[in-house]
């Protein structure tokens, strides 16, 4: 299974410029809202959404670049797809109790020996998405409440297992967006959903600084929107408050500490690029103790992203692979890893909103 913090310097030219989009406008207030989908229909919608993005990539990426990777210790484009689909099959088999999919050996990292061509890889991804959708549909709402063996030799509700699989695919989708951009290619979902500027309007050529700054802006909006959406009286919420049978949320951060952790990490990652000092009281990843109210926490978050824009502006082709003073990581790695890290915690904060009956802002207007 992927170590989400290992895909070094380009990790965060993520799904934000090219995959994550805000869904439409809210329905007019004078119209009756559409009825909610069933739980299994909602899960199926999320499953198919990320699955179809991976399928589109598998079919679209040039076959002669299937072995491309940014760094020697990363998976290739093809191996990323194979891993995402294989883990899906592992979880599908556990949830269904049936041996779905082809034999790809032990674990969740099939080799190219079994999937030699682009067509082989694309078919494997398609089968995983189709089989998962079939199981979700067949088991329905009741199936989401059943439990199956999960990682760590523990039982988990199937709803949690499906959510984990969807988030895992989303993380690998983000990496593959990076691979597209590194090859000067636009991911399929971006071509479909991003309106191109008029040809007559000349745009300045992109730079390393502008590309990273764009990604910081995208994740900044997502994080700020969910922070604003959570009522202040819920800022101390954590899943441990729900006492879900069979769950273990002991020690997880509250929503407030999730937001403060993102901001604190932004400072630790980006301040070496600008040379600015850390804010007073910032000693660890939980942020200053004096920052307590919703307004204070959100301002701390905004200030951290303002630093990120300054950090991005320092990047250029000559210095991006150089390490800042007292750092073992390159300037580009530190700049982009902040985006990847923020996106990871954005996914957790989205779950916190959902647990409190709040639709995340980026999801409003599509199916909610």
Image: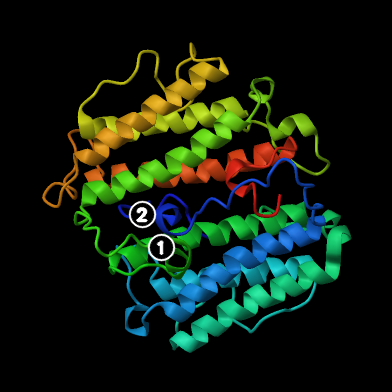
The Cα–Cα distance between marks 1 and 2, rounded to whole angstroms, is 7 Å
Kindly indicate whether the residue at mark 2 contacts the one at mark 1 (C-beta within 8 angstroms).
yes
**The one of 27 and 265 positioned closer to us in this rendering:** 27
* N-term mark: 1 or 2: 2
- For image coordinates 33% across by 53% down, the residue present is 8
- For image coordinates 72% across by 64% down, the residue present is 44
Q: Secondary structure at mark 2?
A: loop
Colour mapping used in the image: rainbow
- For image coordinates 18% across by 50% down, the residue present is 321
Q: Residues within 10 Å of mark 2 (few under 14, many from 20)?
A: many
Q: Secondary structure at mark 1?
A: helix
Say if 361 sits above or below 262 in the image: below
The residue most toward the left is 318
The part of the image, by quadrant, that contains residue 249 is top right
The part of the image, by quadrant, that contains residue 254 is top right
The residue most toward the top is 290
Q: Which residue is mark 1?
A: 177
Say if 292 sits above or below 172 in the image: above
Query: Could you tell me residue 110's position as x and y percent?
Result: 52, 76
Q: Which residue is mark 2?
A: 13
Q: Residues within 10 Å of mark 1 (few under 14, many from 20)?
A: many
- For image coordinates 74% across by 57% down, the residue present is 42
Query: Could you tell me residue 126's position as x and y percent?
Result: 60, 79
């Amino acid at each position: 299974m992927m170590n989400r913090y290992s895909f070094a310097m380009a990790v965060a030219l993520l799904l934000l410029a090219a995959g994550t989009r805000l869904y439409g406008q809210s329905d007019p207030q004078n119209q009756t809202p559409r009825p909610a989908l069933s739980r299994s229909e909602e899960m199926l919608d999320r499953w198919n959404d990320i699955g179809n993005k991976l399928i589109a990539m598998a079919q679209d990426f040039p076959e002669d670049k299937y072995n491309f990777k940014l760094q020697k210790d990363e998976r290739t484009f093809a191996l990323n797809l194979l891993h995402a689909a294989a883990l899906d099959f592992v979880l599908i088999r556990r949830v269904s109790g049936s041996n779905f999919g082809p034999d790809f050996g032990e674990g969740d990292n099939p080799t190219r020996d079994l999937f030699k061509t682009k067509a082989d890889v694309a078919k494997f991804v398609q089968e995983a998405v189709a089989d998962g959708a079939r199981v979700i549909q067949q088991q329905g709402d009741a199936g989401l409440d059943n439990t199956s063996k999960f990682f760590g030799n523990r039982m988990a509700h199937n709803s949690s297992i499906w959510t984990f699989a969807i988030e895992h695919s989303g993380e690998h989708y983000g990496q593959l967006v990076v691979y597209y951009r590194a090859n000067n290619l636009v991911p399929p979902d971006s071509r479909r959903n991003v309106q191109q500027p008029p040809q007559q309007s000349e745009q300045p050529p992109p730079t390393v600084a502008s590309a990273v700054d764009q990604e910081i802006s995208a994740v900044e909006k997502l994080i700020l929107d969910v922070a604003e959406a959570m009522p202040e009286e819920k800022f101390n919420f954590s899943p441990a408050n729900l006492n879900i049978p069979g769950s273990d949320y002991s020690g997880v951060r509250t929503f407030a500490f999730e937001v403060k952790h993102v901001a604190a990490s932004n400072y630790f990652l980006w301040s070496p690029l600008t040379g600015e000092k850390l804010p007073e009281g910032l000693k660890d990843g939980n942020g200053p103790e004096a920052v307590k109210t919703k307004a204070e926490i959100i301002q701390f978050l905004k200030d951290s992203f303002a630093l990120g824009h300054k950090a991005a502006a320092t990047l250029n082709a000559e210095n991006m692979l150089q390490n800042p003073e007292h750092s073992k990581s390159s300037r580009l790695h530190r700049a982009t890893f902040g985006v990847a890290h923020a996106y990871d915690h954005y996914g957790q904060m989205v779950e916190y909103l959902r647990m409190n009956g709040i639709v995340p802002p980026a999801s409003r207007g599509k199916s909610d």
